[in-house]
């Protein structure tokens, strides 16, 4: 293939370098060519982001006859040097809160479900430590990772206990009293200060580097190459760091994308310009090599969402409204979209919702007497995945089992992925992927919401790093396409128009012919039990009798965003004036259920009821 001038400059470089490569710019091709031009007797290590990327890289390097390149992940390197040496046993899927309770024999510190809340924070503290570069737990301040007020109150009250139990759990792993986690052996690998016998080390996906592996990488004597895209950093919530910013190496760029045309490139640059709102934007030129395709018969259609919740809702809509689809695929295990990390399933939450506690399998949820208790637990732990399961259950109720059964019946196996008519994926799961036809779910943060949150954070003196990643998520999403992109109108940058490559999805503005009044009992607002007719479609079966899902999502696109002091005050004012729940919901861009839930938390029904 013909190399660009940017690629030639990288290949002919010497010494430690870092490469900022835009989406689809041929970084793997560049790295392979770089490796080909090194001396034949050179020992080269290529560090891949995960196992699937590693497997693909092995094939590509082998196809070029580069037998002197060893392809590993950070964990595969650490596994051999730590797990084998100490004869550890690894717990493949990690520990759950109930496991920690049993191992540490935790008792409730005087609060409802306190032992589960404490166990949840102990696991998070464990992860925080294992993904840091410090040598001792006491060198970290776990409070810095907590943002919710309820969770912070619990952590502040029991900080010493949480820290000591985290240290005890680590000691039990280190002494082989219990199984170890993947994070643990990677951390122990870093603390052992290993020396890797390579002349060159190529570190891929550097914008989302594990801090512990970056520490190992930086302490090697080899020539070091970091490659990534600073705007594709989306794993900060896992304590990942951007090595492109950390490393003081000579910088090179790959700015031409061979994946898509200039219209998509312009859209991507417009999305990134939103970082102006965070005072963190650096101009990133992107040029598209592929011309717009007018008469296209795309083979691979992918629906991409920011969250499991948004994606699962879209999947439900798709299978209930489009009878033409018979084969679909979810990136990652389909069950991962219906389970939280702690093990609770949609069905467990649904059983709690219906008061059928005997049918609940999850140990934590079995201890819950009501949805209100679960709501309180979520607030004190910031368990967003469990929160998403609750929201899905509140939306679809007892229609869920038959819908999920239908989706699973249509799902194809991994080895049949290429036969799927449509693919569903969150942005985190499709990182590194590309598809012919991409359609975005309307669950990304809009420019208006980012500006609003940025102003709030600025006034409170807080970091905007999470908002930076929200912009990155949309950038990654729009750059997954090879040919066509369908994007909700509310996500489109101002001034951008449709083109042969870009289709703008406009909301259905028809108003419902009927509305449901809120009902109260004894002046109290119950934990949300929504009228499911609100989420129906006039065209189809039992749950399809009113408004379309698209209209509901458009009207309530702010429903699951964090509440701020400003929004709470606005809610208090409207509620104190006697405005109806539906009116407040409409003004706030949230669901009636979300308004009821917030009113209950703020105890406004007692103050103003």
Image: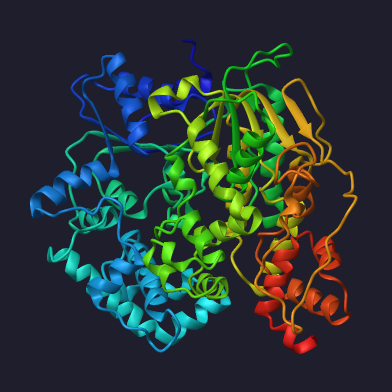
Identify the residue at image location x=14%, y=47%: 81
User: In the shown orientation, is residue 426 left or right of residue 167?
Assistant: right
Instruction: Quadrant for residue 164, please give it.
Output: bottom left
Residue 507 place in picture, x, y as percent: 82, 41
Q: Is residue 227 left or right of residue 453?
A: left
| Relative depth, front residue between 211 and 165 | 165
Image coords of residue 517 (percent x, y): 84, 66
Which color scheme is applied? rainbow
State the image coordinates of residue 547 (x, y, percent, origin top left).
80, 46
In the depicted view, which residue is nearer to us: 296 or 512? 512
Q: Is residue 376 above or below residue 522?
A: above
126, above or below 429, in the image: below
On the question of residue 564 being in view, the answer is no
Residue 84 in view: yes
Residue 389 rendering spot, x and y as whole percentages: 54, 57
Q: Is residue 360 above or below residue 230?
A: below
Question: Looking at the rendering, which quadrant does residue 502 occupy?
Answer: top right
């Amino acid at each position: 293939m013909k190399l660009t001038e940017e690629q030639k400059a990288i290949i002919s470089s010497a010494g430690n370098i870092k490469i900022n490569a835009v989406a689809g710019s041929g970084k793997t091709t560049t790295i392979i060519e770089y490796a080909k031009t090194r001396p034949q007797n050179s020992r080269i290590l290529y560090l891949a982001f995960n196992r699937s990327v590693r497997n693909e890289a092995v094939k590509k390097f082998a196809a070029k006859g580069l037998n002197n390149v060893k392809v590993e992940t950070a964990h595969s390197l650490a596994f051999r040097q730590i797990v084998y040496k100490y004869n550890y046993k690894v717990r493949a899927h990690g520990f759950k809160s109930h496991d920690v309770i049993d191992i540490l024999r935790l008792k409730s510190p005087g609060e409802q479900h306190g032992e589960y809340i404490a166990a949840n924070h102990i696991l998070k503290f464990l992860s925080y430590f294992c993904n840091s570069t410090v040598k001792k737990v006491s060198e970290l301040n776990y409070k810095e990772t907590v943002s919710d007020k309820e969770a912070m109150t619990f952590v502040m009250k029991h900080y010493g206990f949480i820290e000591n139990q985290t240290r005890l759990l680590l000691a039990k792993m280190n002494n082989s009293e219990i199984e170890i986690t993947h994070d643990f052996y990677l951390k122990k690998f870093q603390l052992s200060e290993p020396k890797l016998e390579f002349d060159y080390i190529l570190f891929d996906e550097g914008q989302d580097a594990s801090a512990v592996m970056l520490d190992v990488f930086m302490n090697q004597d080899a020539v070091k190459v970091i490659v990534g895209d600073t705007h594709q950093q989306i794993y900060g919530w896992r304590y990942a760091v951007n090595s492109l910013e950390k490393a003081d190496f000579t910088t090179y760029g790959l700015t031409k994308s061979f994946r898509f045309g200039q219209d998509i490139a312009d859209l991507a640059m417009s999305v990134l310009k939103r970082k102006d709102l965070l005072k963190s934007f650096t101009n990133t030129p992107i040029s598209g090599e592929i011309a717009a395709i007018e008469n296209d018969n795309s083979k691979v259609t992918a629906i991409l969402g920011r969250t499991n919740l948004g994606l699962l809702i879209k999947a439900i809509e798709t299978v209930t409204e489009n009878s033409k689809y018979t084969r679909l695929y979810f990136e990652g295990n389909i069950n991962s979209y219906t389970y939280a990390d702690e093990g609770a399933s949609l069905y467990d939450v649904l059983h709690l919702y219906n008061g059928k506690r005997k049918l609940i399998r999850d140990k934590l949820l079995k201890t819950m007497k009501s949805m209100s208790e679960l709501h309180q637990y979520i607030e004190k732990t910031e368990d967003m995945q469990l929160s998403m399961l609750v929201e899905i259950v509140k939306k679809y109720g007892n229609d869920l089992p038959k819908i999920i059964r239908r989706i699973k019946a249509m799902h194809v196996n991994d080895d049949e992925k290429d036969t799927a008519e449509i693919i569903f994926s969150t942005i985190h799961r499709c990182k590194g992927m590309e598809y012919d036809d991409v359609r975005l779910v309307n669950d990304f943060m809009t420019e208006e919401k980012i500006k609003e949150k940025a102003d709030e954070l600025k006034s409170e003196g807080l970091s905007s790093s999470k908002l930076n990643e929200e912009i990155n998520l949309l950038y990654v999403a729009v750059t997954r396409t090879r040919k066509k992109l369908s994007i909700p109108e509310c996500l489109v940058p101002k001034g951008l128009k449709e083109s042969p490559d870009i289709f703008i999805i406009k909301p259905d503005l028809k108003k419902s012919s009927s509305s449901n009044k809120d009902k109260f009992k004894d002046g109290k607002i119950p934990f949300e039990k929504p009228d499911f007719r609100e989420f129906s479609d006039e065209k189809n079966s039992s749950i399809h009798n009113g408004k379309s899902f698209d209209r509901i999502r458009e009207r309530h696109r702010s429903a699951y965003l964090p509440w701020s002091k400003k929004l709470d005050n606005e809610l208090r004012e409207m509620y104190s004036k006697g405005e109806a729940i539906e009116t407040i919901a409409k003004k706030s861009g949230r669901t009636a259920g979300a308004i009821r839930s917030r009113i209950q938390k703020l105890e406004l029904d007692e103050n103003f009821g």
